Image (cartoon, helix red, strand yellow):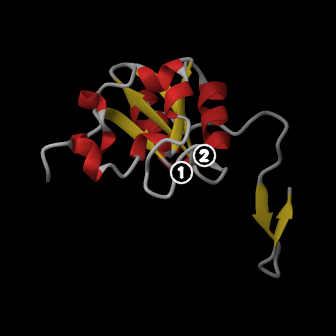
């Protein structure tokens, strides 16, 4: 690696958006989290006690050389980003938990509560018919 970290920048920080989430407090909150994760390019993580939803999406101002095309007019969040926070150099992002699939939320909920995450009320379970095809109960 050269003396200037930015020379090797892969622009990892310009390829996602992470938004704070309220701490999940009940089964409904965990069910909502499962729904988020059923969408492509979405993850949820817990870092230093704070929950976030993360959207894997590339910044429109990222040039092919990983430089910012809007550097002079970039938003405050970009200006406040410090080299010590760089995703390229960090490796371990300090996640306490990281979820990419709904089943991970199920397992986490069961570990935390000792119970399986309940199905939402009023939603019929799917069962197999005698022919082996799924049908609604």
Dots 2, 1 in contact, CB < 8 A = yes
Q: How far across and down, in percent of the image, does residue 103 sit?
A: 53, 50
- Using a 10 Å C-alpha cutoff, classify the residue at mark 2 as few (fewer than 14 neighbours), some (14 to 19) or many (20 or more): many
Q: How far across and down, in percent of the image, does residue 11 sit?
A: 41, 47
Q: How far across and down, in percent of the image, does residue 93 sit?
A: 30, 37
- The image shows residue 124, relative to residue 25, as above or below, that is below
Residue at point 81%, 76% (across, down):
133
Q: Residue furthest front?
A: 72
| Left or right, residue 65 beside residue 70 | left
- Residues 136 and 57: in front is 57
- Residues 61 and 50: in front is 61
Q: Which residue is mark 1?
A: 101
Residue at point 33%, 34% (across, down):
95
Q: How far across and down, in percent of the image, does residue 32 sit?
A: 67, 33
Query: Which numbered marker is on residue 37?
Result: 2
Q: Earlier in the sequence, mark 2 or mark 1?
A: 2
| Left or right, residue 75 beside residue 84 | right
Rounded to the nearest whole Å, what is the CA distance between mark 2 and mark 1? 5 Å
SS at badge 2: helix
- Using a 10 Å C-alpha cutoff, classify the residue at mark 1 as few (fewer than 14 neighbours), some (14 to 19) or many (20 or more): some
| Left or right, residue 8 beside residue 127 | left
């Amino acid at each position: 690696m050269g003396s200037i970290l930015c020379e090797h920048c892969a622009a990892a920080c310009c390829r996602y958006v992470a938004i704070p989430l309220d701490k999940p407090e009940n089964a409904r909150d965990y069910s909502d989290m499962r729904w988020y994760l059923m969408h492509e390019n979405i993850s949820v993580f817990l870092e230093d006690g704070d929950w976030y939803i993360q959207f894997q999406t590339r910044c429109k101002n990222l040039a092919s050389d990983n430089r910012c095309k809007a550097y002079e007019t970039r938003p405050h969040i970009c200006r406040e980003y410090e080299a010590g926070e760089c995703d390229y150099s960090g490796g371990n992002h300090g996640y306490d938990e990281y979820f990419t699939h709904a089943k991970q939320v199920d397992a986490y909920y069961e570990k935390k509560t000792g119970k399986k995450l309940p199905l939402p009320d009023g939603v019929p379970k799917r069962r197999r018919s005698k022919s082996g095809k799924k049908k609604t109960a």
